[in-house]
Image (cartoon, helix red, strand yellow):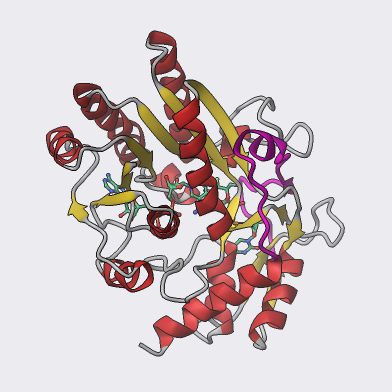
Amino acid sequence: MNVLLTGGAGYIGSHTAVVLSQLGHQVILYDNLSNSSCIVLEKLAQIAGRKIPFVKGDVRDTGLLSNVLASYEINAVVHFAGLKAVGESAQKPIDYYTNNVQGTISLLQAMQLRGIKTIVFSSSATVYGEPRYLPLDENHPTNATNPYGRTKLHVEEMLRDVVTSDSQWRIACLRYFNPVGAHESGLIGESPCGAPNNLMPYIVQVAAGQRAKLEVFGGDYPTPDGTGVRDYIHVMDLAEGHAATLNLLSQTTGWHAINLGTGKGYSVLDMIQAFEKASGRQVPYEVVARRAGDVAECFAYPNKARELLNMTARRTLNEMCASAWRFQQSIQFE
Ligand code: NAD
Ligand code: UFG
């Protein structure tokens, strides 16, 4: 299959490119490099053993997208491109709506023009908002609590309308929980521009001595150790979930929302401890006030992915931490 990955130079897109290309798909990356760099293209070539075609472009450029879809004879699109920082989305909502919502409209227009009707969309567990019950299954009510989450929800709903209007479309909204870790080679991984917003990249930078200590946001949650609990999933398991989803969509039409998580929750202190063990480094930390908008616990009911995609996240917490550390060391000694 010829698959276009928008945002393919980013963290999850690059790992998915590896998996798809190893399965024999022809992968084309499309990215404006606003949160990634060309360096990843060299690393991908090293891992895949061949160059992966790349087009520098913005998803809001419908004309360019439409040309790329035609010239590479694309059969399906995996749509990762977008902005993803929850805090920033409250400061810059217009940027978030244009990149995430307008960007998706532009992509759908280009796809419609070319008669391409298969799309996998990067959604997020954030669409569930404050959990009313746990674990979160796909029938849990949606209620985003920040502009980033609302862009994901708007796109999910838009995609549902598209399927209602034309039953030939094949659409999956993958609701990621917390992706962490890196490819086992250590060549690609998560390297945020500026200070990390998320826990794992922050822990990595503290362990590497780039930051003095980790601030643990809240020690008084109603959780076993008082710190926030999340469902961390290895990025390679997540990437494999995309391959399984394309397989599903090759056999079925319609709109599908599917959780990608492990079903297991780990606290911030669990993560620190696991990382220290995997890296052999200390992660100094201080418990500070809660971060606004955080929930106490969030983890998936992952059975739909198991049933529909035949997929179970199999990599351990130790592999998540060890691979993230391997990647950090590879960029540190470059
Ligand atoms: P990332 O920032 O590493 O990758 C996104 C890529 O999209 C970047 O390479 C960026 O340059 C590109 N991009 C952004 N706006 C673009 C535009 N207008 N046109 C073209 N390219 C553009 O992020 P990621 O962690 O790989 O996330 C991928 C997707 O998954 C995003 O849509 C994100 O919202 C979603 N998601 C991520 C997480 C997470 O914790 N990483 C969790 C849930 C959902
Ligand atoms: N945390 C800290 N210190 C930090 C960073 C995070 O204690 O410096 C804590 C948070 O309070 C939370 C946990 O670590 O308890 C995880 O926080 P992250 O920021 O890594 O992840 P979130 O669960 O808040 O959000 C992430 C993505 C969202 C996505 C969501 C899906 O940032 O885009 O996962 O579950 F929607």
Image quadrant containing the N terminus: top left
Where 277 sits versus 167, above or below? below
x then y, percent, for residue 289 = 68, 60
Q: Residue at x 56, y 80 (%)?
A: 206
Q: Is residue 153 visible?
A: no
For residue 146: magenta? no
Q: Find residue 180 and report its image quarter.
A: bottom right
Q: Residue at x 60, y 28 (%)?
A: 143
Say left or right for 228 vs 325: right
x then y, percent, for residue 3 = 32, 43
Where 149 sits versus 227, above or below? above
Q: Is residue 52 visible?
A: yes
Say left or right for 85 vs 287: left
Say left or right for 244 vs 314: left
How many numbered marks, from 0 up?
0
Q: Find residue 258 and report its image quarter.
A: top right
**Quarter for ligand 2?**
bottom right
For residue 311: magenta? yes
Q: Residue at x 77, y 62 (%)?
A: 219
Q: Magenta part mainly helix, strand or loop?
A: loop
- Magenta-colored span: 288-316
Q: Find residue 106 and report its image quarter.
A: top left
x then y, percent, for residue 32 = 23, 52
The extreme right residue here reads 224
x then y, percent, for residue 131 = 72, 36
Image quadrant containing the C terminus: bottom left
